[in-house]
Image (spheres, helix red, strand yellow):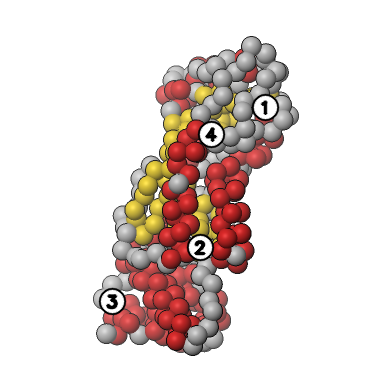
Amino acid sequence: MPILDGELLRAFAAFADTLNFTRAAARVGLSQPALFERVKRLSDEVGAVLYERSGRHIHLTETGARVAAFAREQLERSQAFLDDLRGEARRETVVLAAGEGTYLYLLGPLLRRFARDEGADSLHLLTRGAPSAAEAVREGAAHLAVGVLDLVPDGLIARELLRTPLCVAVAESHPLASRRTVRLSELARERLILTPSGQSHRDFVGRALGGSGHEVRAPLEADGWPLMLHFAALGLGLAIVNGTCVLPAGVVARPVPELGMVTYKVMWRRDGALPPAASRLRERILALSRASEEKAAPAKPTPSVGSRTARR
């Protein structure tokens, strides 16, 4: 079948990786017009548009994402088959997509053990927010994704890893540090440390406070849990973070029940067979579920205001 033409698939996989005809052409050793023509031929064979332009940006269509995943999987399997025929040893590479906080506070020890057992070059890590991580799996750019995502895209299977509360992280000297939990109304009077405008964390907290009818002070912006917690340690404000975060010295975290819980999930493609190494990593991640839930449970404060929560 024409769609199985390896040259067309290779050209489109390079284009899907870069979303740029010039860079994709250089990657596969073609001229830009030649690569453009191969992508067009594949689109004609599929009978659907594979990408669209929005201003100066290019993005894959729904069909394009599925074809990209198919192309990457076929190229990966073809290379493995050739290596086997030639008797060449080949170490599989597993591509995992997850966010900064997930790597720092949830997957770090597991990835260290996996790299030790499978080889350091067996892992390729993409740092992506949960929606982008899921999209990388859907398009075949990653085998697995881990993150907090309420709506899982079509075509992906998701399994829950853990549920953890949203907490307020404060300096030990702050009056709220002595509480078991913190009410949403108490945060309205404080300066909060939030992610930049437009990010889901900022939008969620803003809606929660706005819905409570309380006036919100202008927040201090910080991109990522480590910087948010650092600002909290400096006493610059109160950070709203996930309960999995490891706290720096001088900071405690208290759940805010009205903000609810967030759920970490591991995701993979529904219609794609995971390579053996990716399956092994998936099973290790899934095995984290029970242990991670125990670690994510917030520690009860001691009578001393200066006590710290247990590191998660």
Q: Earlier in the sequence, mark 4 or mark 2?
A: 2
Q: Pick the residue in front: 193 or 134.
A: 134
Residue at left offset 72%, top offset 30%: 249
Spatial CA distance of label 4 from label 2 is 26 Å
Q: Earlier in the sequence, mark 4 or mark 3?
A: 3
Q: Earlier in the sequence, mark 2 or mark 1?
A: 2
Spatial CA distance of label 1 from label 3 is 56 Å
The local crowd at label 2, few if under 14, some if 14 to 19, many if 20 or more residues have their Cα within 10 Å, is some
Q: Pick the residue in front: 99 or 280.
A: 280
- The residue carrying mark 2 is 95
The reply, left or right, for residue 263 in relation to residue 249 is left
Q: Earlier in the sequence, mark 1 or mark 3?
A: 3
Residue at left offset 50%, top offset 64%: 94
For residue 295, the mark is: 4
- The residue carrying mark 3 is 46
| SS label for mark 1 | strand
Image position, residue 250 (x, y; %): 71, 26
Which of discs 4 and 3 lies nearer the camera? The answer is 4
Q: Quadrant of residue 300?
A: top right
Q: Quadrant of residue 232?
A: top right
- The residue carrying mark 1 is 251
The local crowd at label 4, few if under 14, some if 14 to 19, many if 20 or more residues have their Cα within 10 Å, is some
Residue at left offset 54%, top offset 72%: 91
Q: Quadrant of the C terminus?
A: top right
Which of discs 4 and 2 lies nearer the camera? The answer is 4
